[in-house]
Structures are given as structure tokens and as C-alpha cells.
Amino acid sequence: MTTDTEPILLTDVRVFDGAADRGGRLAVLLRGGIIEAVAPAADVSAPGVRRIDLDGAFVLPGLTDSHMHVELLGQGMLDVDLFDCGTPGQCADRVAARAADTPAGEWVVARGWRKSIWPTDDFPTAAILDEKVAGRPVYCKSFDGHCAWVNSAAMARAGVTADTPDPDGGEIARDEAGRPTGVFKENAIGLIRPLIPQPTEPQQREAILRAQRHLNELGIAGVHSMADLAVHQRAAALAREGELTLRFSACCRPGEEADAVRARAAASGGDLARLVGVKMFLDGTVNTQSAAMFEPFTGGDSVGILTQAPEAIREKVAAATARGLPSFIHAIGDRAVSTALDAIESAGGTGLHHRIEHAQVVRVEDVRRMARLGVAASVQPCHILTDIAVSEKYLGPRAGRSFVLREMLDAGVMLAFGSDAPVVPADARHSLYAAVARRNLAGSPPAGWHAEQRVTIAEALRAFTLGAAESIGAAGALGRVAPGHAADLTVFAEDPLAAAPSELLTLTVRMTLVAGRIVHDA
């Protein structure tokens, strides 16, 4: 990889500029981390500049994942991976294999279990883990991060018994006698998670480095990090040291606004590491039936969980707005989305680039309200790949209100796409395919799931580039292959605009550039 921002001339390329195909074979001149020219090669004068002939490769603005957890992605690469386990027993076997190599008394941490792919729809129990790993505490995070499955040793360490009350905004799963069964939803996870030793500062730094290498290989040039001020500070330090190879747009948490404003003013990470908003949580997920819904999930009377009261989210949005910081609110269920919009509308400051994170199930009236308020939808279409059957099962006829991408675009809602990694793989090609095909990776359903909500390939690419930039108020500097914009580029060997939907999954990442640096070169 290049270690500086030497001038580079990319020749013989096709260009998607963030909005449309420029047509023909062009050259792109990069100098000082900025795009200086995009024109036919004969029209670009660049003597002495390093020339890279890309033989008809396809250049687009650097793909930006608008919702992910970078540090968790890097840390999760070291955890036990349960994503493909087809039964709770397989999960327990995999955990037991790791436990055999873990010093006595230390926690065994796993991630990624999905009951939606198991033979039965029952939540797992501590007894299943106890059978394989009884002597040391085990913590298994669900793939969506909104549920924890632990063994009896973990509950004993936490002092959780039948007398332990459910915390506000959380739920402890219990048997008929009221005894905890080993599953903790939403805020109840906080009864267990703080007991697990946190990574050291060097380990957290290495997690970012590990994740960014993986992301660059996938063609990801930028991320919107849904973490906290400490993660931003680590990214800013890496930027100052020349080690950051992502354009890192970070969030802080409620209560950190004053420090975030000071960090913004100091621009401690330069252009590469910036603070862009305040991340807030309002509900759970459809997978764990903890998304906050107006009507109960199919087959029961649960309407999910609002993880904080409406008045509490209003106060937090108002506090952030008063500091000039937009709110990025996790809201998956239709009741959560509506509650988030109520808070944004009551706070004013609609020009601040507020966002709804996920916006998975949204009523027609709230799609229109998002457009009217200028609230962006930060959506992860790759969740369609895992949520089709789950949505049909738990939402019934309301499943058609899931991932209403076409409706949002037609209504004028700004779309920004991401992955939510490490919840699912960080591969942007999965979201491109899901948004365009509305099918799972096995190609089902063949006609597309609620195919009327498909978007075009160009629209999907825009949501990963210019849409991502617009959603944080950076459209004048990021998200375009145009003079004066940051030289963040993703280069595919093939033309995605000419690809069949299934071919989007196998696009070849030829090169990734960030601020004019080549950070991946295949």
C-alpha cells in the first residue's frame, strides 16, 4: 500500500460518479488526497504523475458503510462464531471446543446464534450450555446483538435468581416457576455483560486495525461507526499516526455531547476521523420479538420493547439538538420509528441530518413524515437475506411494510446503506444484491420478496456513496467522483450497472483508495 498521497492518474476507467454512469473510458487524477480531474485521458495533463492503467475497470466513490460497529467487528473476529450453527447443540459444541483452550475461570465469549435457522423456534436455555460447559461462565450474543444466552455459571456470577426483577426496557426469560432460563433481552443484557473483562486499550486499537484491513479488502473506504466517543478518539489517534485507512465518521452516546462538540472543534482526527452524531437506542429486533410494534407479533400478545420511555428519548434528542448534533436513533419496529420521529419533530433542528437507524418496519404516514422532516433512513438491506422468513412468521401481513426502499425513495426520503457488521458480514455486495433482487442467497423467493420495493443498481450504489455522504451533511466533500471531492474510491473489475442481480455478489474488488492512498490493491 502507498504510504503517502502521491499524485496518481487512474487511466482507462469507467466511472459511476455517485449519481450516474459518466460513460466512455476516462482518466481520474488524484492529488493531495483530492480528485483533481475526471475527463478523457487526452484532456488530462499530468506530467510526472504515477499512472495506473486499470484496463476498463469500474471506478465509483468509495463505498461507505453507513451503519457498523468497527471495533466490535475486529473484536468479534476473535470470538467463537455461531452464525452458521443449525441447532443450539451445535452452538454448545463449538463453545465447548473453545472452553477447552480457555484458562479455568475465564469467560468464554461467542456471538452470532440465530434461532431463526434452528429446527424449532424455542429460545435456547442455560441447561444446553451447562451440559457441555458447566465449570466456567459462557456468554453467547445473538447475531443481532439484542439477546444474550448464558449458562448457569454466568448467572451465578451475576447473582441472577428468580427474585431478580426485569430491568426497565429489558426482559429475563423465565420458566413457568419464574426461574431464569438463561436468555436476556435488551437492557437485561446489562445484568451480565459488564462482568466480562473489557479489552485493553492496545487490544481495542488492534481491533480497529484488524477490522479496517478486512473492510478495505471488501472495497469499503468509509464507515459510520455506531459506537461512542472513546472509539472516535482511538480512530483519531490512528489518523494522526497515519495508520487509519478508513474515512471514519463516528458517533458519541447521550451524555457525551459536550465532549463531542469540543472534539469536533479540535478536529483531532483531521478529515479522516470526525464526529457526526449521537447514537441512541429505542427498541430491539424482529428476530427476538423485541422491536417495538403498534400491534402484537403474530401468535402472541407481545408488542416488543421500547428500551426507553418516549419522554426520555425526547429529552436526549433535544439535548443533542441544542448542541448542534444530529440524532441517529435505532428504531426497527413501527412504534419505535414513530416515537423517534416524534422526538425529532419536537426538538426542531430538522436541518441537522437526523437519521433513523434500520427503519425496518415503517408505516406509510411515517415514510411521508421522514421525507417532510428531512430525516434520513440508514438501512441495511443485507438483513433481508436473514429476515424474510422471520418477518413473515412474526409480522404476518405487516411483513410488507419491511424495508420499504422503493417507497422511501419515491417519497423523497434520503437513503444511506450499510451492513450493521458484525451482526452480519460487512460485505456491501450482499446489500447491493438484497436491495435489487429482494431474494435470499439461495435465490428465494424467485420473483422477489415484496418485489415492488426493489431499487435499481444505480440507486443502491448511490445509497452506499452519495447517499451516505448526504446523510451526514458531507455531500459537498464526499460521495462523488468529481473534482474537489475526497479521493475515496472503490474500483470493481466488472461493471456493476451491467450486472445481473446474482452477479453483484461476485463483483471483484480491484482496488480501494482512501484520501488518495491505495489501501487495497488486488
Image: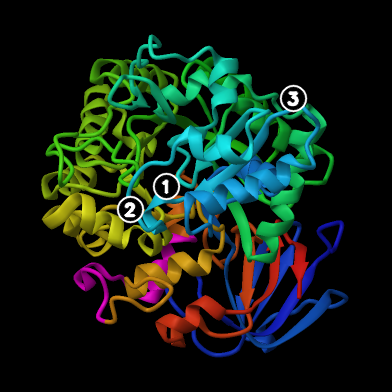
Q: Amino acid at mark 2?
A: Met
Which image quadrant is residue 207 in? top right
Say whether residue 264 is magenta: no
Residue picked out by circle 2: 414
Horizontal side of residue 139 vs 372, given as left or right: right
Q: Which residues are magenta?
A: 447-465
Q: Position of residue 291 (x, y in %)?
A: 28, 38
Q: Is residue 384 rendered to the left or right of residue 78? A: left
Type of residue at label 3?
Answer: Gly
Label 2 SS: loop
Q: Secondary structure at mark 1?
A: loop
Q: Which residue is mark 3?
A: 105
The numbered mark, 2 or 1, whose residue comes first in the sequence reads 2
**Does the magenta-highlighted stretch encompass residue 453?**
yes
Task: Mark 2 and mark 1 in contact? Answer it, CB < 8 Å.
Answer: yes
Query: Label 1 is placed on what type of residue?
Result: Ser
The spot of residue 513 in percent (x, y) is 70, 64
**Residue 204 visible to an observer of this rendering:** yes
> In the rendered image, which quarter contains the N terminus?
bottom right
Dot 3 falls on a residue whose secondary structure is loop
Q: Residue placed farthest to the top in the image?
A: 163
- Based on the displayed image, in which of its 4 quarters is residue 60 positioned? bottom right
Q: Earlier in the sequence, mark 2 or mark 3?
A: 3
